[in-house]
Amino acid sequence: MATEITDRRAAGRPHWSGRWAFVLAATGSAVGLGNIWKFPYMAGESGGSAFVLVYVACILLVGLPVMVAEIMLGRRAQRNPVDAMAALADEAGAARAWQGLGVMGVVTGVLILSFYSVVAGWMLDYLALSARGGLAGLDAGAAQARFGALLADPLRLLLLHTVFMAMTVVVVGGGVARGLERANKLLMPVLFAIVLMLLAYGVIWGDAAGALSFMFRADFGKITPAVMLAAMGQAFFSLSIGMGAMMAYGSYLDRGASIARCGLTVAAMDTVVALLAGIAIFSIVFAHGLQPAAGPGLVLQTLPIAFGDMRGGAALGTLFFTLLVFAAWTSSISLLEPATAWVTEKTRITRPWASLLLGAATWLLGVTVLLSFNAWQEIRLFGLGIFDALDYLTTNILLPLGGLMIAVFAAWVMQATRVRDELGMRGPFYGVWRFILRYVSPLAIALVFLNLTGLLPRL
Ligand code: TRP
């Protein structure tokens, strides 16, 4: 059966043009709203350094090992995540039910994209606003009112959400080389340049000392089970792991590339961008006496005040929201890719139509999300609004669960010789990776889950 898997490599599946194209695309997937919109506000809400500390630990002990495993599964199978899990289960002599992991991933991707696109729409709105100079002279009250007015306007949200979904569908419909790879090669360098410019601004004119002490001063007292789960979920979300996006991207990777090195590069870039964006944003927040714990509206309710108040703020604000839109765009395509690859490879529907079809379904779900900010505000699922419920379900439950299953499959179910052969890792690294993936990562995920459900005494 191993031959069957290897045979598919020649079957004319699309491929990245090289190792760097993959690293860039995977980094594009990882670096997104999660880094620049979510990470700062979650850190701000969860006591700053406590959250940052647990987050970095989660990246090292769970995120990186699982990412390497997920890419490895994809590259070995050379198939979309659903068929990949079926083929790999066959190869390992395990139950076909492992396909369920692939299906769960495809569904999770659509669920995440439905609210991701709505948030990306906010960023489009603020990009347009700052580009026409609309941030000038905004004070705290006006900034809050502006964000509130946007949330209260379903038609406007609908338009923005539709534009962003269309941008996503166009790229995914274009395919691996002409769509995904080209978009990432174009957008990612600009994105890095903007992060560095913002950081330079924050450090020179902002309160960098305040930002650094907020983010890194050791403060273990604030580490609670809820903070731990939030940090773990955020690590999964930010690295784009646990749902098959990395598996799909890995399936377009050539045999020669070192998966470990690719994974390490992607995880490092993602973490660095989150930390740098955090430093830049909190430097500006503190320098203007704003609140770090403003929640999901942090970058929209606080930064515009700062942009409106500073010299060159219109330009800086425009740059900042361009950054957010580009980052969101290179991520959203990876949320739609697994489902699109599945439909394309399984049915006779062509890629452009598959991407349009799935995009339309996601769009529809997104409409319920944007209504949850206004007309459907009263609707509660498990005590949360639709937006919060989807975010919680995917980030804190489905992604860690997917990650747990990936770890178990790669470290316990697959034959070690095949894993080793696929990774091509030498020396002690392989042993360390395997040990962490076998014992540490699953245990860490399980502990966080159990602790949350109250089955364990509070840590
Ligand atoms: N990582 C992206 C971000 O930080 C979001 C994302 C893209 C994602 N693809 C994913 C999250 C797959 C989980 C799984 O914004």
Image: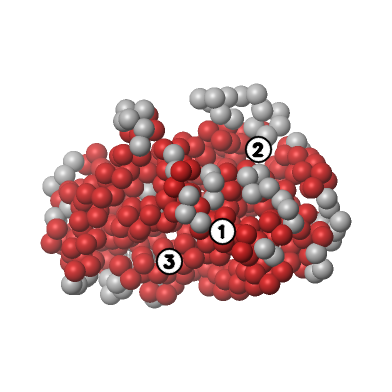
Q: Of the two numbered discs 2 and 1 on the same chain, state the one appearing first in sequence.
A: 1
| Pointers 3 and 2 in contact (C-beta within 8 Å) | no
Residue sitting nearer the eye, 366 or 457: 457
- Measured Cα–Cα span from mark 3 to mark 2: 33 Å
Q: Of the two numbered discs 3 and 2 on the same chain, state the one appearing first in sequence.
A: 3
Residue linked to disc 2: 370
State whether residue 43 is above or below residue 30.
above
Query: Which of labels 3 and 2 is toward the front?
Result: 3
Residue sitting nearer the eye, 370 or 9: 370
Residue linked to disc 1: 213
- Measured Cα–Cα span from mark 3 to mark 1: 22 Å
Q: At which x and y percent is residue 452?
A: 39, 33
Q: Of the two numbered discs 3 and 1 on the same chain, state the one appearing first in sequence.
A: 1
Q: Amino acid at mark 3?
A: Ala
Residue occupying the point 31% across, 39% down: 447
Residue occupying the point 61% across, 24% down: 379
Q: At which x and y percent is residue 439?
A: 22, 49
Picture disc at residue 268: 3
